[in-house]
Image (cartoon, rainbow, N blue to C red):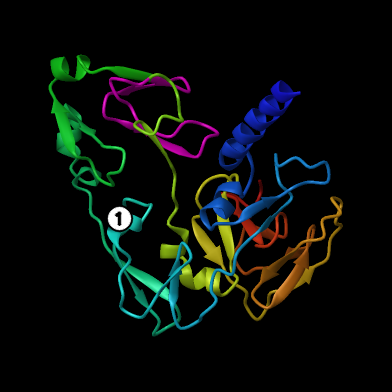
């Protein structure tokens, strides 16, 4: 009996860890501190809805990971989970939002250097922290084989279906759970989209809903709810501005090639296609 319980917990714990990489919107909700609601058969892969805390209990303050920040106060850098979000301070003048310093990485525009060198990174760095130059030096670096691609020591990669950001290291053993090589991808949702979340806007994704959203879609005067079929019989509902949708409902938006629907409450989610013919 103990063995059975142990195996169940092992599988259950592993399933929770795979949610972000395997299930649409799971990474989005988990970053916001929401918890998966069990399906009717008591499994959590993949959840049909999430339960979120009150993400904005005070409209006159900003919130990050449950902590309130007054106007012009800064988030301590060691608490920010996204290395590219630097010097972020709260501003409530035009609604609660965080303003962060712009981060310019030299490797994004130094094309001459890239032809003879490779940039190397550390796990918690936004920009490269070093370079390796010369064919012999580059050839001597350790390599990591991931998803059919070869990465040199110090190069970053994102393994498929994991929602992880990793760095190829000399000690790489193929495990994405090694904290010295991989970390969870953090989209900086509360930092960069604080005002949109406050207004119950919908995250917009391209392709699938396992990656970071590219934008948020907010209601307009022309937005209308199109009632659909709740084939999953999910009781939870979605909010879009002041509108309430049931699972299976869609809402019209002004953006072309963008479909917004209540798929996994409590947020409406949108998918933008590269072509309206897709």
Q: Secondary structure at mark 1?
A: helix
Q: Residue furthest front?
A: 2
* Label 1 packing within 10 angstroms: few (<14), some (14-19), many (20+): few
Q: Is residue 231 left or right of residue 81?
A: right
Depth check: 278 or 222 in front?
222
Residue at (64% x, 58% y) in the render: 269
Question: Residue 13 appears in which quarter of the rendering?
Answer: top right
Question: Residue 88 appears in which quarter of the rendering?
Answer: bottom left
Image label count = 1
Q: Is residue 161 magenta?
A: yes
Depth check: 8 or 171 in front?
8
Which image quarter is the N terminus in? top right
Q: Is residue 135 left or right of residue 228?
A: left
Residue at (13% x, 26% y) in the render: 133
Question: Residue 10 appears in which quarter of the rendering?
Answer: top right
From what the image shows, is residue 104 above or below residue 66? above
Where does residue 46 sit, x and y in percent of width and height? 70, 42
Q: Is residue 45 left or right of residue 207?
A: right
Residue at (60% x, 56% y) in the render: 34
Q: Read off the magenta span.
A: 145-172
Residue at (63% x, 53% y) in the render: 35
Is residue 73 something one can see in this rendering? yes
Where does residue 132 sit, x and y in percent of width and height? 16, 27
Where does residue 62 sit, x and y in percent of width and height? 43, 74
Where does residue 256 sit, x and y in percent of width and height? 61, 61
Is residue 258 something one can see in this rendering? no
Q: Is residue 205 magenta?
A: no
Q: Which residue is mark 1?
A: 78
From what the image shows, is residue 123 above or below residue 54? above
């Amino acid at each position: 009996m103990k063995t059975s319980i142990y195996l169940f917990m092992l599988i259950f714990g592993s399933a929770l860890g795979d949610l972000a990489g395997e299930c649409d919107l799971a990474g989005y909700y988990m970053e916001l501190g929401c918890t998966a609601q069990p399906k009717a058969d008591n499994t959590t892969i993949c959840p049909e809805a999430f339960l979120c805390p009150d993400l904005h209990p005070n409209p006159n303050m900003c919130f990050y990971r449950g902590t309130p920040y007054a106007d012009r106060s800064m988030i301590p850098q060691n608490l920010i989970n996204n290395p590219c979000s630097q010097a972020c301070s709260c501003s409530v003048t035009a609604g609660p939002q965080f303003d962060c310093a712009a981060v310019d990485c030299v490797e994004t525009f130094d094309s001459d250097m890239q032809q003879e060198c490779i940039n190397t990174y550390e796990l918690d760095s936004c920009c490269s922290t070093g370079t390796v130059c010369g064919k012999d030096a580059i050839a001597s670096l350790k390599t990591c084989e991931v998803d059919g691609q070869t990465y040199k020591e110090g190069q970053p990669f994102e393994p498929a279906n994991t929602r992880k950001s990793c760095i190829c290291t000399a000690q790489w053993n193929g495990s994405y759970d090694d904290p010295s090589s991989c970390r969870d991808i953090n989209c900086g949702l509360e930092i960069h989209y604080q005002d949109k979340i406050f207004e119950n806007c919908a995250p917009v994704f391209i392709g699938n809903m396992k990656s970071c959203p590219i934008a948020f879609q907010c209601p307009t005067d022309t937005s209308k709810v199109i009632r659909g079929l709740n084939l999953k019989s999910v009781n939870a509902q979605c909010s879009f501005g002041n509108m309430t949708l049931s699972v299976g409902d869609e809402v019209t938006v002004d953006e072309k090639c963008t479909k917004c629907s209540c798929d996994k409450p409590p947020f409406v989610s949108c998918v933008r296609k590269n072509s309206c013919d897709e």
